[in-house]
Image: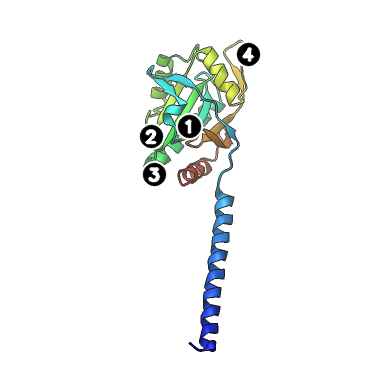
């Protein structure tokens, strides 16, 4: 092989190697910028659903979980949140990931009034489907541990109205909190679904 031909192939191979390295760097930068950070660790908990079935967070390990808080007598933000979650639920159902890969979990601040029967009536009146969406309640002690674990504030004002934090949490399959969203009418449903899909590809 002539020296000119060797130089030609050396230049070609060097160029291909440089392009490959650049593509790897660009991919890593892109992937790193789109990957959701680990913000905190979710607390382990065991509660019951509105049918009395025992539900433990670790039972759904490996799935993405969207955890929210509410109480059925809430006059404003909880209702707006659940209305938005109906839309999120529908989108995830259309994508074919609800239940098998993604769960919605809504925990009541008010287990004394939000009995199993009340939760069933609440979801039925609002046409909330139980597909991949668990409405959970616990004892007052269990509820306090969960609220403390998520750093959620909730206080009964003595008239059945709670002053409470307005956050919902996106958990990966290892119980890491990967995103925190504001509850209410201004929820960005598209971003939430996008982040869920991001975690499914993580």
* SS class, disc 1: helix
Q: Position of residue 124 (x, y in %)?
A: 38, 23
Whether tag 4 and tag 2 are in contact, CB under 8 A, the answer is: no
Of circles 2 and 1, which is in front?
A: 2
Q: Position of residue 114 (x, y in %)?
A: 47, 15
Residue that numbered label 3 is attached to: 95
Instruction: Please say whether residue 27 is visible from this viewpoint.
Output: yes
* SS class, disc 3: helix
Sooner in the amino-acid sequence: mark 4 or mark 3: 3
Sooner in the amino-acid sequence: mark 4 or mark 2: 2
The disc at residue 157 is 4
How packed is label 2: few (under 14 Cα within 10 Å), some, or many (20 or more)? some
Whether tag 2 and tag 3 are in contact, CB under 8 A, the answer is: no
**Residue at 56%, 50% in the rendered image:** 34
How packed is label 3: few (under 14 Cα within 10 Å), some, or many (20 or more)? few
The disc at residue 99 is 2
**Snapshot quadrant of residue 22:** bottom right
Whether tag 1 and tag 4 are in contact, CB under 8 A, the answer is: no
The disc at residue 83 is 1
């Amino acid at each position: 092989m002539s020296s000119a031909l060797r130089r030609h192939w050396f230049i070609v191979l060097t160029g291909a190697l440089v392009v490959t390295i650049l593509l790897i760097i660009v991919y890593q930068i892109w992937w790193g910028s789109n990957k959701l950070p680990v913000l905190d660790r979710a607390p382990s908990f065991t509660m019951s659903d509105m049918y009395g079935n025992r539900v433990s967070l670790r039972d759904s390990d490996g799935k993405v979980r969207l955890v929210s808080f509410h109480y059925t007598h809430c006059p404003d933000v909880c209702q707006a949140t659940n209305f938005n979650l109906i839309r999120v639920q529908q989108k995830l159902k259309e994508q074919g990931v609800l239940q098998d890969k993604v769960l919605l979990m809504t925990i009541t601040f008010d287990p004394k009034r939000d009995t199993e029967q009340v939760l069933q009536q609440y979801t039925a009146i609002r046409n909330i489907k139980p597909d991949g969406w668990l409405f959970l309640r616990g004892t007052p002690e269990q509820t306090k541990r969960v609220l403390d674990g998520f750093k959620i504030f909730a206080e009964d004002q003595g008239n059945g109205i709670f002053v409470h934090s307005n956050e919902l949490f996106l958990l990966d399959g290892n119980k890491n909190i990967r995103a925190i969203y504001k509850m209410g009418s201004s929820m960005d449903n598209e971003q939430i679904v996008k982040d869920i899909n991001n975690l499914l590809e993580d």
